[in-house]
Amino acid sequence: MFATHDRTQALSRRRRIFAWAFYDWANSAYAVAVLTTFFPLFFQQHWASGLSDTERTYHLGMANTLASLFVVLLAPVLGAIADQGGLRRRFLLSFAVLGMAMTGALYAIGEGQWMMAAGVFMLATIGFMGSNVFYDALLAEVASDAEADRVSSLGYALGYLGGGLLFAALVWMAASPSSFGLADREQAVRLSFLIVAIWWALFTIPLILYVREPRAGHTRGLGSITGGFAQLADTFREVRRLRPVFLFLLAYWLYIDGVDTIIRMAVDYGLTLKFDTASILTALLVTQFVGFPAAIVFGRIGERIGARQGILVGLGIYMLVTLWAGFMRSVWEFYLLAVVIGLVQGGVQALSRSLYLRLIPRARAAEFFGFYNMLGKFAVVLGPFMVGWVGRETGSARIGIMTILVFFILGGWLLTRVDAGGRNAQAGNVNVSGKGGDSR
């Protein structure tokens, strides 16, 4: 009887882990197909075709910046309220619905309406980024410290695979619209936004069904709001007191700027260098499918050498990629850089999430992940703006892209100062191994 109960518990745990990870499969379609590819592509060639190259880059950067700034301001407050009220899952779904609705709405925007397109895109991106704050926090509900690297990496791996599969189908549809009964490429790209919204909604269902958040002991209603603000003030003080958390957040703020800016500006940069659209889309597909196994491998690397060391390896490779990008001339170089980025992108993101989980109090995961996402998104406030502004001021997109290098160098140096030994005992937790011991 006990064996049967244990098997049932194990099955339920695995189902919860995969249901959580499948949200990455769901919303990564937005990340790769809309945020990274079709929106910047359509923005440059359709909605903002009457603007100059540098003006288009500037407005695209500003749209990303304003969306990120909104999440920066809200994430810690909503995270604290979510912890107080047991609302992580509900907030995740609320932001996700906003993202899905606005992504679908891009289908209806006409040619030349670049301001409307930018506004709807900002709302969709707020939904995408806001839901990720609470998705990250729910990792504490589905994985122990010993599992954190593996489970976090599984999410990113499924994201690369699911996003890549849908992206491949959408690229095929855009390249051969007649095969799908569509009039032209413009109609295919418009329809892509609608398909991404439906995909995002469909694969969020497992999380709705199987990922539960304990509500016992949580404050409800107005009490959760007032308690959330009080907890937020306390956490500001605690983050400063917990040196490993404080240093990690500063490091993450800097180096994730480079990672996210490369993701968001790659298409625009390729177009500025006059690479053809087909080559750019192929390179992005390569990144997705290389990223699937690479994210899983990085999870294993984190378990063997430690998450911090794994991140530092990835950042070193990103520095080389940025230097190369500033001087590349040929499309084959763009392909090769896509392969290299695919090898490290998901790994850096996944190990950052799992390392941070080990440093913070689990009971306040949403609030602390609010700070984590706040700084990550504040970095994206700076990154695309710097690339666009420096490129416009110097007249060189190559110089603009090279500004990313500074963030990798400073972020990597600060990360070496982080004591990755485990969760601070003063935060109400026992120490765990930096390579993944279970604190419970």
Image (cartoon, grey):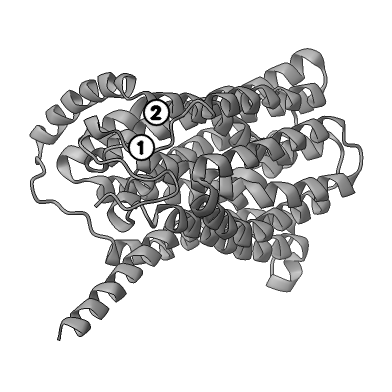
Residue 108 seen anywhere in this rendered image of the structure: no
State the image coordinates of residue 132 (x, y, percent, origin top left).
41, 45
Callout 1: 10 Å neighbours few (<14), some, many (20+)?
many
| Image vertical order of residue 317 relative to residue 52, above or below | below
Q: Residue at x 40, y 50 (%)?
A: 436
| For marks 1 and 2 on the same chain, the one whose residue lies earlier in the sequence | 2
Whether tag 1 and tag 2 are in contact, CB under 8 A, the answer is: yes
* Amino acid residing under circle 2: Pro
The residue tagged 2 is 244
| Image vertical order of residue 412 relative to residue 182, above or below | above
Q: Residue 315: give its label.
A: none
Q: Residue at x 69, y 71 (%)?
A: 181
Callout 2: 10 Å neighbours few (<14), some, many (20+)?
many
Residue 198 seen anywhere in this rendered image of the structure: yes
Looking at the rendering, which quadrant does residue 213 occupy?
A: bottom left
Looking at the rendering, which quadrant does residue 128 occupy?
A: top left
Element carrying mark 2: helix
* Amino acid residing under circle 1: Leu
Q: Is residue 171 left or right of residue 438?
A: right
The residue tagged 1 is 359
Q: Residue at x 67, y 61 (%)?
A: 289
Residue 233 vs residue 61, the one in the foreground? 233
Q: Marks 1/2: CA distance?
A: 7 Å
State the image coordinates of residue 309 (x, y, percent, origin top left).
56, 41
Residue 6 vs residue 305, the one in the foreground? 305
Element carrying mark 1: helix
Q: Which part of the image, by quadrant, shows the N terminus?
A: bottom left
Q: Residue at x 30, y 20 (%)?
A: 241
Q: Is residue 271 left or right of residue 362?
A: right
Looking at the rendering, which quadrant does residue 268 occupy?
A: top right
Residue 395 vs residue 11, the one in the foreground? 11
